[in-house]
Image (cartoon, rainbow, N blue to C red):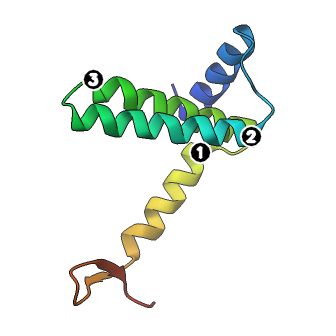
Amino acid sequence: MSLKDYQKEIIQNKRDHHFNTTNIETEFVLLYGEVSEAYRAYQQDDAVGDELADVAIYLLGIAEILGIDLEKEMIQKMAINKKRRYKRNTKGYVEKVDE
């Protein structure tokens, strides 16, 4: 099953349960909340996998609402990132080297 298939399935499930499928601002806020829950689960050594699944579900739902093929976008972005070069600055942070 492709990510695009999952995107469609996620939206259908939201429709079936009368969840929001139109207000993108609400979806971003809910995604943010799910990321926060995942971080809390990680801190508490709890069910972080379950929470990360929620993050992925919300993210795929947003992509479908916006008409974005997230799998295609990820593949393109990974190819770009693979070619990028990074270095540590004097404070120890990783930063992109100008191309």
**Residue 71, quarter of the rendered image:** top right
Q: Is mark 3 on a helix, strand or loop?
A: loop
| Label 1 to label 2: alpha-carbon separation | 16 Å
Drawn side of residue 44 relative to residue 22, left or right: left
**Residue for badge 1:** 70
Residue 3 to residue 71: above or below = above
User: In screen coordinates, is 59 left or right of 67?
Assistant: left
Judge left or right: residue 34 versus residue 73: left
Q: Which amino acid does label 3 sit on?
A: Ala
Give the Cα separation between the discs numbered 3 and 1: 25 Å
Neighbours of disc 1 within 10 Å: few (<14), some (14-19), many (20+): some
Rendering coords of residue 90 (x, y %): 22, 90
Relative vertical location of residue 44 with respect to residue 78 in this rendering, above or below: above
Q: Which of marks 1 and 2 is nearer the N terminus?
A: 2
Query: Foreground mark, 1 or 2?
Result: 2
- 10 Å crowding of disc 3: few (<14), some (14-19), many (20+): few
| Residue found at x 74% / y 40% | 24
- The answer to which of 34 and 58 lies nearer the viewer is 34
Q: Judging from the image, what secondary structure is the residue with disc 1 in?
A: helix
**In the image, what residue occupies the spot 39% across and 75% down?**
83
Q: What element carries label 2?
A: helix
Find residue 24 and name its label.
2
Splitting the image into 4 quarters, where does residue 29 fall? top right
